[in-house]
């Protein structure tokens, strides 16, 4: 009985992921793999900013699996990054203001395992 429940749960998560409703954090991904800046360097970043801290945020946001596209690690806070960042903020119950600071940096380094918010079209 327990095995059937686990199989049903697994199938449901796979279906949700295929529909873009779940973005599981990759078990193999680690914030340690993003080394463009120190993990303690967390400046406020907004749309239009450039530099190594933006590249660090791009790398961290790319650890999310599922439907959201991978961002280019070019160090430019463009509209694609803004869209993905606002989605990540919403997944964590943060204001979807597109500003990377305090709590947003925290969730980039420690993302939720799953997000049931569909990625915006």
Image: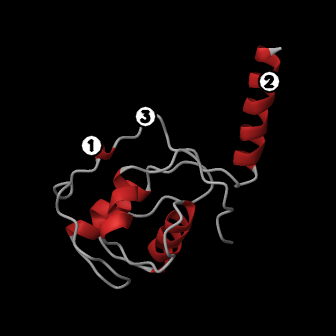
* Disc 2: which residue: 5
Q: Earlier in the sequence, mark 2 or mark 1?
A: 2
* Disc 3: which residue: 28
Q: Kindly check if marks 3 and 2 are in contact, taking CB atoms under 8 A apart as contact.
A: no
Q: Position of residue 8 (x, y in %)?
A: 81, 28
The front one of 111 and 48 is 111
Q: Nearer the viewer, mark 2 or mark 1?
A: 2
**What residue is rendered at 21% in x and 51% in y?**
35
**What residue is rendered at 78% in x and 38% in y?**
12
Which secondary structure, mark 2?
Answer: helix
Q: Nearer the viewer, mark 3 or mark 2?
A: 2
10 Å crowding of disc 2: few (<14), some (14-19), many (20+)? few
10 Å crowding of disc 3: few (<14), some (14-19), many (20+)? few
Q: Is residue 72 rendered to the left or right of residue 7? A: left
**What residue is rendered at 32% in x and 46% in y?**
31
**What residue is rendered at 51% in x and 44% in y?**
25
Question: Could you say which quadrant of the image residue 50 lies in?
Answer: bottom left
10 Å crowding of disc 1: few (<14), some (14-19), many (20+)? few
Q: Looking at the image, is 53 positioned above or below residue 70?
A: below
* Disc 1: which residue: 32
Q: Is residue 73 visible?
A: no
Q: Looking at the image, is 103 positioned above or below residue 97?
A: above
Alpha carbon distance from label 2 to label 1 = 35 Å
């Amino acid at each position: 009985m327990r095995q059937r429940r686990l199989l049903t749960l697994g199938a449901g998560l796979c279906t949700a992921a295929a529909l873009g409703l779940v973005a599981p954090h990759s078990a193999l991904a680690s914030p340690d793999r993003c080394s463009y800046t120190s993990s303690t360097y967390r400046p406020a970043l907004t749309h239009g900013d450039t530099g190594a801290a933006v590249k660090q945020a791009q790398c961290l946001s790319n650890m999310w699996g599922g439907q959201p596209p991978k961002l280019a690690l070019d160090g430019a806070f463009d509209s694609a990054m803004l869209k993905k960042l606002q989605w990540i903020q919403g997944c964590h119950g943060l204001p979807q203001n597109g500003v990377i600071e305090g709590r947003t940096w925290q969730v980039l380094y420690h993302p939720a395992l799953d997000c049931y918010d569909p990625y915006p079209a």
